[in-house]
Amino acid sequence: MTDLRDLSTCWHRGWSASRALPAALDLGPGLRVRCLQLGRAVEYLAVDTDPSSLRLLADRVAAEDEVTWLTVPTTDPSATTAVLESAGLVVLRGSELLMTVDLRSHPRFPPAAGYRLSTEQDTAALTATLFEDASGDVGARGWMGLAGSSAVADRISTFPGHRRRGLASTVMGALAAAAVDTGAERGILIASEEGQQLYAKLGWRGVATVLVAAVPGTVYPS
């Protein structure tokens, strides 16, 4: 059985490391960080889907002066949505998945012909980049934030003009290998609806739906 609290907390640590964010404030049923990311300035992560915990976090979200999200991994999205809506929030997004994998068995792929791979590490994060030999342009790139024995894949992107060449799979494999070299064993990510098929083919499995909620009038970025 998956420990959703542990998985969610480790995801947040790794995601924050990937984006060089400040340490989160631990509120018990959730974490708060002023993240200044696309679409929001503050984000709460619920690590407990008990209705009383969600209502407490919803009240804090409503009291914030800046645009704020409440992100909630849940194995019962219908029930969790009902609690969030009864607490005065609206669900902006409900199609993402919290996914995990054993990094030690993650498939690796060589770069496509005409590309070279560069992998870098700082104290808290890994970066894998594929450069096109002919132009020097970046074809694909991704990050992985380190969180103890876990590592969190983040911002895996293939750029226009370089798609359908398996570059994202190469980036994911390179990040997994580099993370294992640091001692990580478990991979975690939150996948958009578009990315879920790719990650499933690489062996990742979904363990929870991820809801993003906010006060009425908040717009999810396109």
Image: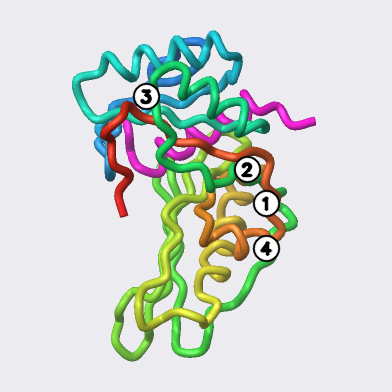
Q: Nearer the viewer, mark 4 or mark 3?
A: 4
Q: Nearer the viewer, mark 3 or mark 2?
A: 3
Q: Residue furthest right?
A: 1
Q: Which residue is mark 1?
A: 103
User: What's the CA distance linking mark 1 and mark 3?
Assistant: 25 Å
Q: Are marks 2 and 1 in contact (CB under 8 Å)?
A: yes
Q: Quadrant of residue 200?
A: bottom right
**For the residue labelled by badge 4, is the local secondary structure a helix, a strand or a loop?**
loop
Colour pattern: rainbow
User: What's the CA distance linking mark 4 and mark 3?
Assistant: 31 Å
Q: Which residue is mark 3?
A: 23
Q: Which residues are magenta?
A: 1-24
* Residue 184 numbered mark, or none: 2
Q: Amino acid at mark 4?
A: Leu
**For the residue labelled by badge 2, is the local secondary structure a helix, a strand or a loop?**
loop
Judge whether residue 9 can be spotted in this image. Answer: no
Residue 92 rendering spot, x and y as whole percentages: 40, 39
User: What's the CA distance linking mark 2 and mark 4?
Assistant: 17 Å
Q: Quadrant of residue 98?
A: top right
Q: Which residue is mark 4?
A: 202
In the displayed structure, would residue 131 be above or below residue 73?
Answer: below
User: What's the CA distance linking mark 1 and mark 4?
Assistant: 10 Å
Name the residue nearer the viewer: 8 or 214: 214
